[in-house]
Image (cartoon, rainbow, N blue to C red):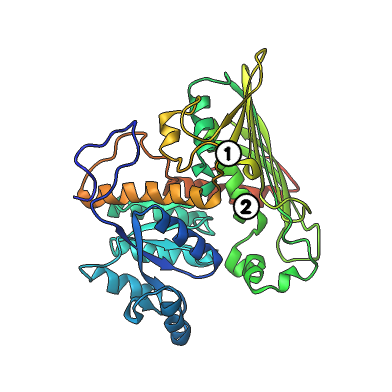
Amino acid sequence: MILPEKIDVYGLFPRLSRRLRLGVVGGGRISGMQATAARMTDRWEIVAGAFSSDPARAKAAALEWFLPEDRCYTSYTEMARAEAGRDDGVDAVMITTPNHLHFDCAKTFLEAGIDVLCDKPLTNEIVEAKALIELVGETGCVFGVSYVMSCFPMIRQAREIVAEGGIGKINQIHVEFMQDWMTPEDVADAPYVKWRLDPSKSGRTSCVGDIGTHAAHLAGFVSHLELTELRAEFHVCGTPKPLEDTFFAWTRHSDVPGTLMATRLAPGNRGGLRLRVFGSEGGLEWDLEDCDRLKYYRFGEPDRILSRGHGHGISSATERLVRSARGFPEGIIEAWGNLYTEFAMAVAARRDGRSLPKGWLGLPSVADGANGVRFIDACVHSNEASGAWVDVV
């Protein structure tokens, strides 16, 4: 058994009987960041990877990742087949490739019986997202999607406040994601940018599929409301590009109106993700660049600022995602760590043949990933229809 026999639903996440074995598919900065976070949880060890189809580069990656050469593969197909046949094979893989490879890569590992944590967007096409949902159901594998913004402790606290009626009936939702890294005119020439502006790899969007999906997921995650309609406009605000660098959208979560916007050309904004949810009795505001604090308003009462830490109004469910004391900042690595902690709990439970306690984990699922693909598709169709209202189905 990997999990302890008894789990305290209201307590800290339990220690496992062993570290889980994690494989890496894809290279670059994001895989390194996720690997750092996974190791930080003390629940994962990196044991294998498919970093390059070039044998020389794959060999070099083995040295960089401190892995044996025979476990650095030149294709994810080879990796899935070999690892599934080992007694000490990977328990799960992270997929951090460009978007166009997500579907086939995830499908390959699921069919090998290996659990998956996939970067967003889940796929470039709705039909592929639906196929993954079906395959997860058939295989019983764990499938997480890296909507990491939902793993900040104060976002979990905000979601809990909404669920308990702390702001009354929601009447509007506003979310924005402002960045500035595409401001330079020559930025499109950078290797890590080129694929993000290539429709054959990024899909039909760039900004929408990358950071817009984070914003859309966050709005639904905190509000507990499903996005039902939107109207969107795509813009290229800087140097001409084949895909948008900015978009604006009006949204409806059933009868609740809202706004959603994102850009990479807002000088002075680096991690400018901001969420505001207002209701009949109060409101909530959260800012990624001040992620340890949650503004909580009750109409007619003094304003409150809840800060990440133990006690002082923070719930036990939020506390299990906290690593350092109040006043000692945490950030994106810790949020990734929370994602990999919850992924570990789900993977360990499947390996043990156990069902998880209902509501215990907030791990974004394959269904959440598919919702993100539907959001992207609706944005594309609305933009093509000159900003007409489109159903998100």
| Residue 326 x/y as whole percent | 53, 36
Q: Residues within 10 Å of mark 2 (few under 14, many from 20)?
A: many
Work out how far the residue at label 2 is from the one at label 1, CA to CA, in angstroms.
21 Å
Q: Which mark is residue 292?
A: 1
- Please name whichever residue, 134 or 347, is drawn nearer the observer in this view of the structure: 347
Q: Three-letter amino acid code at disc 2?
A: Ile
Point 37% across, 75% down: residue: 67
Mark 2 secondary-structure assignment: helix
| Residue 275 x/y as whole percent | 64, 37
- Asked if residue 116 is positioned above or below residue 176 in the image, the reply reads below
Q: Which mark is residue 6?
A: none
Q: Earlier in the sequence, mark 2 or mark 1?
A: 2
| Residue 250 x/y as whole percent | 70, 38
The image quarter in which residue 12 lies: top left
Which residue bears the numbered disc 2?
211
Residue 229 appears left or right of 179: left
- Asked if residue 334 is positioned above or below residue 303 in the image, the reply reads below
